[in-house]
Every structure is written in structure tokens, then in C-alpha cells.
Amino acid sequence: MTSIRERAAVKSNNVLKGKAGLRKEETGEYCQRGLCTVFSSDLSMIGGERTVIKIHLKIFWILTAVLGLGLTATPAPSQTPDEIINKFGDYYAIVIGINNYEKSNLRDLNYAEHDAREISHILTEYYGFEVISLYGSEATRRSILKTIRTHITALGENDNLLIFFGGHGLLDPDTDEGFWIPADATDEYDQEGWISFSRLRKLVEATNADVKRVALITDSCYGGALTERSVMYGGLLSPEDDIHAYQKWLIKKAGDKSRLIIASGGFEQVPDQSEFSFVLRDILENNEFDMIDLYYLFNKILKDSNYYDQEQTPLIETVYPPKNGKAAQFVLLRRK
């Protein structure tokens, strides 16, 4: 897998040569991720060759074809495992977690960085992501925006980018504009030092950029302000219903460009000790399927938690394509 720095350097050279344009507030006994990095350059190559998942998929489909395994509703995919893996490209992630807000009067968090580190480990260890981690005091506004922009610009037409944020989020009560609060925010109402959701949406949309799939997951207060349609629905198929049909459908959609946003809550505060992040980590770590998509993951988060009994409402939205949102997918390939 080519590193982001190498890709950025190549595209930068192309631009120079004229060959390409590139485009503290507490509630009850806990602190909310709303009211109350350092660009650490973790650019190490992750995973090397994809041997594990190739063997995984190959054994599954061979056994299914030869023995049946009780799954006869649809035929096995016609492509080889290598061809299938190549369809989905390389995987990159930006994982942000901020506990301490030393320059502002926002209450420090206790769990955001822990959640981010755990998610980073799972993405790297189990799903073959190359992860850039921005934790703590160096997760500044500049470094967050620069890192996202660099990835959006440098990644290629068959690449995948997942962005995760854990930290404070705030909402302007007059405009309903939401914001991520970076580590260097200096004042609770200094919006110039925050990261607006409208800017994040534009970066995620980036339909003119080459990168094929982008997904943003925010575990912060008022994350629902990142979504425009504020929908709460799942995908069309599930691997638990018909594994063959599900995998064939994901493979069929592999060539489509997509942009997705998942928020841990709507227009409300969410707890510091996040049920959302806990269930997300648990599902990713214990997933037994070779392929899953983020709509399936979202449905599992709702099913495996007690969100239906809470005021907190996780949301998912397809930013692109706009007319057929359920058709867009961000697929995760289990590597271990």
C-alpha cells in the first residue's frame, strides 16, 4: 500500500508539471461531549500483503461451493478472491481523540482518546487500514483540517478513507450550525477556532476528488447537525440473512463512488463514556464476516445497544450519491 506522503508527493509533482490538478458542562455525574494532534505522523505501512483475507475468502467460497454449507440460495461470486480484494482498493483512516481542552473553559473528557486509540488499533489489526492518529494537545484545528484535506486530495480512484472523531461538539443555538472543538480552542464561544460541520461536509463530499469512498463517524455532541436529511435507516441486505446475496451485492457496488456520515447522536448531548464507541468497537472486533458495510454496522450498533430506550439517536446519511442513498456503500474487509 502506498503511503499518503508518497501519494501526496506524486500528485504535487504532477501539479507542478502541469499534468494534473487536484483538486464544562456537566449533566448528572458525567461530562457531555459538548458543553461543559498532534499530527503524530503514524504513517507506517499497515498489513503489507493481503494474504489473510485472501485465504479467508478462498476457503469460505471453496467450502461453500463443494460442500454447500446450507447456503444454496445464490451461487458463489464468479471472481477470484484476489479480483474481489482488488475491487475495493486500499484503506486509510484518520482517527482523532481529544480529552483535554487546556486553553478553553470546556470540561475535559475522560474517554474520548481511549475510544479513539481502541478504534485505531482495531482498524489496523483486523481490517488492514493505514491509520493517521491525532490525539490530545496536538489535535489542533490546523492539523485536523490539513490531515483530512491531504488525504482527500492524495488518495486514488479506488481508495477508501474513514474519518473518526471523538471529542467535544457544540451547536450554535441561533443558526443550528454544529462544530468540532479542536484541542487548541481558546474560548467556549470562539467559533473562529472551531471546525464547522458545513466545512467538514464539503470536505467529505469532495465529489471531484479521486478518492472513491469516504466515511465520517463522529462521536460528539450534536453530531446530527452534520447530517442534512437526519435519517435513521439501514441497508438493503444483511450477511445474516443471505451471505451469498449480500456479498454479491457489495461486490456489484464496489465500483461506485460514495460518501457517508454516521453520528452517535442527533441534536443532543452524548455522554463522555460513550455507549456508541463501545458497541462500535465490540462489533468490529467480533465481526465474523469477511465483508460488511457501514449500513449493516449501523444497524448492529442500534440492535446491540439500548439506544431505542434513550433520547440519544444515532444517525446515518448518504451524502453522495444523493438520489439513491441506500445504494452507496463503504465496505470493510476482515483481514484477521
Image (cartoon, rainbow, N blue to C red):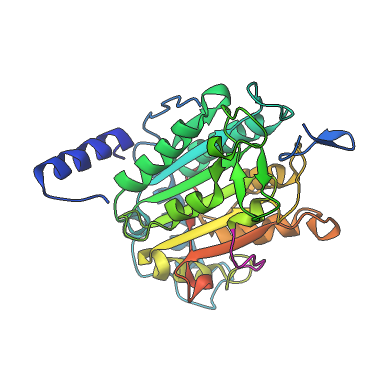
Say if the magenta span includes residue 77: no
Q: Residue at x 52, y 37 (%)?
A: 95
* Name of the residue lying farthest toward the left: 17
Of residue 74 and residue 26, the one placed in the foreground of this image is 26
Of residue 234 and residue 37, the one placed in the foreground of this image is 37
Is residue 284 in view? Answer: no
- Magenta residues? 227-234
- 319 vs 316, left or right, is left
Is residue 126 in view? Answer: yes
Residue 21 point in image, percent of width and height: 20, 51
- 252 vs 17, left or right, is right
Q: Residue at x 40, y 51 (%)?
A: 160
Residue 4 point in image, percent of width and height: 32, 37
Q: Is residue 289 above or below residue 152?
A: below
- 301 vs 321, left or right, is right
Of residue 285 and residue 215, the one placed in the foreground of this image is 215
The tally of labels here is 0
Quadrant showing the N terminus: top left
Q: Residue at x 49, y 25 (%)?
A: 38
Residue 205 point in image, percent of width and height: 43, 58
Residue 320 point in image, percent of width and height: 45, 66
- The picture quadrant where one finds residue 300 is bottom right
Q: Residue at x 76, y 37 (%)?
A: 273
Of residue 239 and residue 94, the one placed in the foreground of this image is 94
> Magenta region's main secondary structure?
loop
- 275 vs 29, left or right, is left
